[in-house]
Structure formats: C-alpha cells, structure tokens
Amino acid sequence: MNIVIVGAGKVGKQIGIKLTSEGHDVVIIDSNKEVLSRSGNEMDAICVEGNGADYRVQREAGVAGADVLIAATEHDEVNMLCCLIGHKLGAKRTIARVRDPEYTAQLDFLKEELGLSMAINPELTASEEIERLLRIPSALNVELFARGRVELVELRLNAENPLVGMQLVEINKKFQLKILFCAVQRGENVIIPKGDFVLEVGDKLHVTAAPEEMSRFLRMAYPEKRKKVKTVMISGGSRIAYYLARSLDKIGVQVKILENNPARAIFLSEELPHALVMLGDSTDHELLVEEGVETVDAFIAVTGMDENNIISGLFAKWKGARSVIVKVNNENMIGVLPDSSLDGIISPKQLTANKILTFVRAMSCSPEESNVETVHELVGGRIEALEFLAKGSHPMYGMPLRDLNRYLHKDLLIACLVRHGKTIIPGGNDCILSGDRVIVVTKHKMFNDLADILTGSIS
C-alpha cells in the first residue's frame, strides 16, 4: 500500500518503521531537514521536505494516489488541515492525531466534516490503558479484544505465587476456570506453551479469558493484589494526567497531581475541581514523601521526560506505593530496567502505532476476506495477538481444532472465540464458524487474513 505520513516526530517515526517493516511504500513529509534525515536513515522510506499542510507539498509526495494519509505532527490544527487537503486531493483514507480535549469532544463532528477515516488521541488512549492496569493491579499489561469481551493480561510470577511449579493443565483443573495461557516469556525465550509446560519463578505469563473469568482467576492466583485502588498520585500534569484524573474522579478515586508549571497547575485545578493539584517537582523526593507517596494505592508518572518518570517511579516503589505505572516512550530505556522494578510501563507512541497498524492491515483485505480487527504486540514485538472476524465460507470452518491443528503454522495458538457475544476458550472439539471473532497468538508477523494462519490449503 502507498502511505504518506506527515510529521517525522516520535509517533510518525514509530508508525513509519512499523509500516515499512511490513512492506508498505511509505513517504514521510516534515519541514525539519535534520529530523527527516534521521528518519530516512532508520527506515526504507522516501522523505519529502516541506510543510505537510501545503497542497503542493502533498502533491509532490503523491498524496493524490495514496491509500492512506497519516497526519502526526505536534499540532492538532495542522493534522486536521493536512487530512482535509489530502481528502480533497484524493487520498483514499486519512488519519489524524488529535490530542486537545476540546477537539476530542468534537471528533464525531470533525471526522464527518473533514473526511477523516480515523482520529487518534495518544494521550487519551494511554490514560485508558492506565485505567485498565489500575483495575487489575496484578497485571503488567492488559489488552482488549472483541470490544472488551476478551482480556489478554500479562502477569509476573514471584516466588510466593501458588502457580509456581505447576503444569498448565494442573492449573486449569485446580481453578476450574475458562482461561488459556497463550505465551510465556522466560528470560530471553518466548514460548507458546502446551499443557505439560511447568511454570517457574520470574516467568511472565500472557493469559486470555472473558473479564469475569479473569477476575476469578486473579482473585485466586493473586489474592494479595485484589485491594481496590482508592488513592492515586500522578506525577506531571500532562494531557494523560488530565484524561486519567477526569476518568478516575467519575468512579470515586481520590487523585493528587504534582505539576511544576504554575500556569498548567492553575488550569488543572480549575478543570479538575475534585482533584488536589500541587505545585512542585515530582523528582524532588522530599516532596513526594511529604505528599504521602508511601501510602498511595497507585503512583503514576506521566511527565514529558522518560528519565524523570522512571526515577520518580522507582523511588515511589521503594517507598512503598502499592502499584507504580510510568510512561516511557524510549524502548531502549525499558530494556535496562530491573525486571520487577515497576508494575506497569505504557508507551503512547506504541499504542498509537498499533491502532494504525490494525487499520492498515484491515484495509489490505478485500471485503470478502476475514480481515484483522485488532492487533496487539506482546513481548517487545516478538509475539502478536490478532483478532479476526471470520467471514464468508472457508474449509477450516466447522473443522474441530484437533483436526485443524495439523494445518496451522507452528508457534501459533487459537486463543479464544467470540460467538454471538459469548466468549469460548476453545478445546479440541470446538471449531471456527463464520461470524466468529477469532483471537490468535503467534510468533509470525504480518497476518492480514484469517486464512494466513494456515500453512497451505486444507485437503
């Protein structure tokens, strides 16, 4: 597919790297020659210097014949104007990054007026991700499928966990729950396990289930972390903090925000009347102690500096904050952190890139094909969890999974089926039917259609 990206910043570059790695033809527009040069060195893309909101620059970049135009500059207004121009020039689909809360509230209207196919708010998406982690305190990461009917949760096993030393088949018998262990990360190895796999201390598990089944499992396996979150301290008054505080207030959570910019602090105190906004630097450890960091149920670090988020998060964890979640966009920094040092790490640019990747993969299929509905990367991109909508007819439909297995790629697992709103953790007698939502976990990349899970035709 021919894809044009306006803006070569963190988000634009991340999107470009992912799309070029999947074989798409990508053109990047940016007015900063130095930034553009770095992007050109990191991916196989054509770089065009200029203002992406100038129709002449867009014409030069080939927007008229583009399958997708993605506007990911730092300015919402520029992104929306880019998409309007791109739509007028003939781009088949347009996607805009829109971050301002005022614009976010008007997205449905703006999408129609500007011809937007999709509008993405990375900060709102990140705040929703943090809220999910707060709802499941034992989770390192939570991904949703089938409009929330299926959860895929990442968990860490410590020495005290009752699952240590058990085979997966024993766990299912003991707990009598409809859950599936999709993947296990053990050190540098990533395993899609079978029933005889034995869990060890330090393993990171990826477990899928319906929300109610997941809650039951976590109550049994992680009883010490089932206490409801009632108090949250947020480091940094960013847009993520604004969206998160607004959402937590609706469910009765007490929120305290530390912000070092006086004007921003005043804005937040006016917009969030039920939150306590403190003027101060969250890297000041004495201030954190004074404000009671050791007593909060959760500490969330979402400043604009990854280093500050990590440092304040590690300090909060050391002082006794029950759950610590930090925003880190630089993947290299994540790799140097001790494995059990933080309870959750979120990356807005990664979340945004995954959403756009899902959209592009779905576009790659014809209307008759069982296209991708959702894509989530696990274990640093080494595994993908994909949701497909089974369409039409196919020889695999109706075939028991025990028979279908011999046609599937290795290192691939059919993790879950959703049929008429009901979640099914499949066994050997279950089968895929037309209309099902099928969640697949695999080490393979670039699956666009459900048929891609097969090694060849079914005889």
Image (spheres, helix red, strand yellow):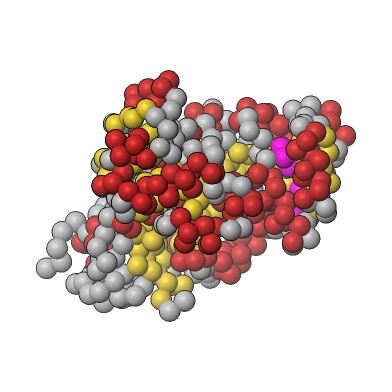
Name the residue at the bottom extreme. Answer: 420
Seen from the viewer's position, the closer of residues 440 and 160 is: 440
Please say whether residue 41 is one of the residues in the magenta stretch.
Answer: no
At 43% across and 20% down in the image, what residue appears?
Answer: 34
Residue 42 higher or lower than 323, as above or below: above
Residue 255 higher or lower than 226, as above or below: above
Task: Name the side, left or right, on which 177 lies relative to 259.
Answer: left
Name the residue at the right extreme. Answer: 290
At 53% across and 62% down in the image, what residue appears?
Answer: 108
Q: Quadrant of residue 7?
A: top left
Tell me residue 145's x, y (percent).
Answer: 47, 62
At 61% across and 47% down in the image, what residue appears?
Answer: 100
Q: Quadrant of residue 268?
A: top right
Q: Is residue 448 visible?
A: no
Seen from the viewer's position, the closer of residues 67 and 179 is: 67
| Count of picture labels | 0
Q: Is residue 449 visible?
A: yes
At 69% across and 45% down in the image, what residue appears?
Answer: 241
Q: Quadrant of the C terminus?
A: bottom left
Please say whether residue 234 is one of the residues in the magenta stretch.
Answer: yes
Tell me residue 329's x, y (percent).
Answer: 54, 35
Range covered by the magenta-colored residues: 229-237
Tell me residue 223's x, y (percent).
Answer: 68, 58
Tell me residue 402's x, y (percent).
Answer: 28, 69
Residue 140 higher or lower than 368, as above or below: above
